[in-house]
Amino acid sequence: MLLNLAAERQVLFIGGKGGVGKTSVSSAVGLHQARAGRRVLLVSTDPAHNLGHLWNRPVGDEPVLLADDGGSGVLAGVEIDPSATIERHLKQVGETLRDFMPEHLHKQVDAHLQLARQSPGTHEAAILERIAEVVELAERDYDLIVFDTAPSGHTARLLALPEIMSAWTEGLLNRRTKAERFGAAIRALDNDDDPSSSHGVNRDRRIRQVLTQRRVTFEKLRELVTNSSACSFVIVATAERVPVLESAELFHELERLGVEVGGLVVNRLSPIDHGDFLAARRAQEEVHLAKLRELLPSVAVDTLPMLPGDLVGEPAVDQLTARLS
């Protein structure tokens, strides 16, 4: 299921509860697609990044080569840096606000941004803009983008943001239209023909340009994540009670947002032929697996076994990829 899904999409989100193996599964599918000749960008949006640890090499905010098949296939990785993303986001917002505001209000702008740095939603908004930026740049250079996402709740909020922020920006644009009409009426009443009066008109135009660009960015991202022929979401879980229940909740939230869930991957199933302890554990896992299929009967399910040793480096990812094939 997963490999076929990845082969047919341009963007794939891999998500689920923390600690279930999202990075491992994301790396395995990315490596498989690279070996199939596609140029793949693997992007971690989880603040607790594991991508560099898994591949045993530094991975940062710009693409780093993870694997190369010697031909056209390439796998590159990016770990979105939340702190750097927020700083870049607030710097851009600050420059825009200071450009729009009178100089005597600049200190208030700085104070507001300092508060915003710790405000709820700032992190998600910054990460969302970085995701939109990565998608826009990657569409030119890569055939597939695989997002290794943060735990379920964070990811669901993030995918809800494009619609929310697009509506919020539209509201700001409507208010700008009223403000521009009011400003034009005042200038007409004052018979102000001084060329310097164009400053206000230019400022209004710049504000509108910034807001319009943000709306276009969020609308494009929203269109992408809800386009089931281009984008899909795969939920990773383990066969345990809490991950199963959380996966069902995530599925229904994504369904409400209009995001296609292409399938489920149940990771780290215990072997049944390695002693009574593991056999008993596997029997319990089968109960939870049955419950997951009962909760989400229409969703395809792949399973992966528990593997010996640490999953580190390309050979280990290769071993996991072989289990998906």
Image (spheres, helix red, strand yellow):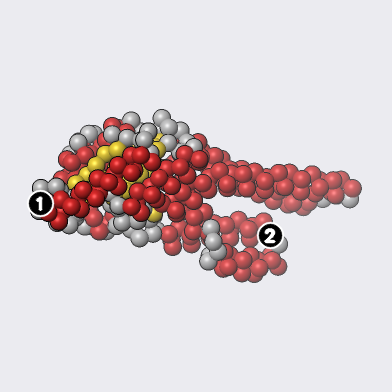
The residue that mark 1 highlights is 274
* Left or right for 84, reference 108: left
Q: Name above or below for residue 83 compared with residue 226.
A: below
Classify the position of the C terminus by image quarter. Answer: top left
Type of amino acid at the residue the image marks with label 1: His
Classify 10 Å Cα crowding around label 1: few (below 14), some (14-19), many (20 and above): few
Please give the name of the residue rendered at 24% of the width and 45% of the height, measured from the top-left corner.
286
Of 243 and 171, the residue lying toward us: 243
Marking on residue 158: none
Please give the name of the residue rendered at 18% of the width and 52% of the height, measured from the top-left corner.
280
Q: Name above or below for residue 104 compared with residue 194.
A: below
Of 186 and 218, the residue lying toward us: 218
The residue that mark 2 highlights is 101
* Left or right for 80, reference 201: left
Asked if residue 10 can be seen in this view, the reply is no
Of 146 and 311, the residue lying toward us: 311
Type of amino acid at the residue the image marks with label 2: Met
Q: SS for tag 1?
A: loop
* Left or right for 115, reference 301: right
Q: How many marks?
A: 2
Specify which label sits upstream in the sequence, 1 or 2.
2
Please give the name of the residue rendered at 10% of the width and 48% of the height, measured from the top-left corner.
273
Q: State which quadrant residue 184 falls in.
A: top right
Q: SS for tag 2?
A: loop
Asked if residue 298 can be seen in this view, the reply is yes
